[in-house]
Image (cartoon, grey):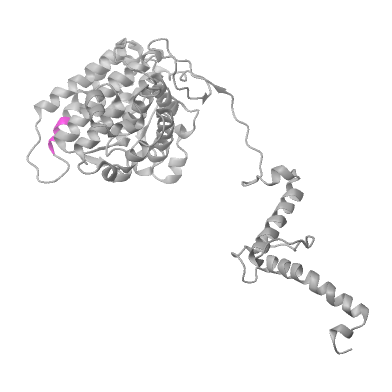
Amino acid sequence: MGRVGTWPWGLGFVWDLLMMCGPIIVLNFVTVFRIGVGPSIPPRKRSLPILFPFVPLSDSPKKDVLILESRHRLLRRRRRHQLSSCEAHTVNTRLTSPPSLPRVRPIRYPAVNAQPNLLHHPLSGPTTLSVPPSPSSFSCAPTKQISSPTTVARLPFLRRWTPLPRLRRRLSSSVAASRSRLLPLGPTVTSLLSLLETLIPIADEIPPLPHSARYGNPAFRLWHEKLESSAGSLLLPLLQQNQELVDAGAVIELVPYLLDSFGNPSRIDYGTGHETNFAAFLFCLARLDLIKEQDYPAIVLRVFVKYVDLMRKLQLQYCLEPAGSHGVWGLDDYHFLPFIFGSAQLIDHKYMKPKSIHNEDVLENFEKEYMYLAAVAFVKKVKKGVFAEHSPMLDDISGVPNWAKVNSGLLKMYKAEVLEKVPIMQHFLFGSIIKWE
């Protein structure tokens, strides 16, 4: 009786049963209480063990524990959510039904300069901008409303269906696969070009003053003062197309956006926030029905290009400090929208690829025709050294296979890096046209 081999039949059976079932009991005990195996688990996720039939799992106790844990989680999901066995293997996120999405309608492109393979951006809501405000609503100048990340989260135009991002996307779409700048110019486009061309000689009349600092030549304040004194008269040719707007004092609404489009005279800086103000200025003109849908290609390829050329002249002449720059981790110290519009312009190009920006001959011969190439050429002009070191973001984007992906990625990046940043949007103005709601 003292040796196992001489035990009665009943005790020997119990011994054999313990030897066979002991490992699975120990593994389930370790699974629940995590005794020295695997990462810790929060107490709220601990549960009673589930004993599985004893089958060979693996040659390692730790692997056995992981297999048992996966089976345990799988059965819990099946019971709780009543999923099929196929669905239970693919559940990786919170098991909630997706919210109902609005109907999506494609953009109707203008007949002018239409191309066969345009990039369509599905946008919810109507394809036309909302009705402009009544002339009697221009009572006071726009003011600032953003002061914290909480107020940035409440920005009314961050939702996809709101007009400002939609106009930006439609402007981008209007020049998709566009090759020529020989576009019909409406009265608003002609007035905007005349306004920008008027500001260029003013910069020539005010040379930079002797200044020892790297950035911020004080002569820029003189240039901005002249702009401020003549802003009202510069806008009159635009508003005279609708006399009701002149009588209602729409100049009060438009002047602040125009002045903020050319940098800050106190800090003597310029950045993507000022560029966004120029986009908001164009948006106001569209809401007032001064910019028509057929004007969109000319607005981008003529007006916006002229605006960027003027700003680059001011940046170099008065050494404007980059406002809100990300340094090497940004596309450009000053601009963002030229990359969005320029990438749309190159969509479906037969020969030009994103990697073509590394070809100096391509940049030299085509920078005057394509906005993206002009933007890259300007970056290489003002920044010295290896391109991948001073502009790693642009270098990474050059590895994207096609321009459509570049354009869609830049649109998302603009929303995240410009429209959702407090240091940039805290200076944005809200008034009767772009309302703070």
Q: Position of residue 266 (x, y in %)?
A: 21, 40
Magenta stretch: dominant secondary structure: helix
Q: Is-magenta flag for residue 221? A: yes
Q: Is residue 260 left or right of residue 73?
A: left
In percent of width and height, residue 15 lies at 84, 77
Who's the residue at 48% across and 28% down the image? 162
Using the image, determine if residue 117 lies above or below residue 374: above
Q: Is residue 244 magenta?
A: no
Q: Nearer the viewer, residue 394 or 134?
A: 394
**Would you identify the image quadrant in which residue 420 lies?**
top left
Q: Is residue 184 left or right of residue 220?
A: right
Q: Report whether residue 138 is seen.
A: no
In percent of the image, x 44 and y 42: which residue is there? 151
Q: Residue at x 28, y 34 (%)?
A: 358
- Tell me: residue 232, above or below residue 417: above
Q: Nearer the viewer, residue 159 or 235?
A: 159
Residue 106 drawn at (x, y percent): 52, 20
Seen from this angle, which residue lies furthest front?
A: 5
Q: Quadrant of residue 382?
A: top left
Specify whether 410 is left or right of 262. Answer: right
On the question of residue 243 being in view, the answer is yes
Up/down of 421 relative to 1, above or below: above
The residue nearer to you, when weighing 114 against 98, is: 114
Pick the front one: 1 or 90: 1
Q: Which residues are magenta?
A: 218-223
Q: Position of residue 238 (x, y in %)?
A: 29, 15
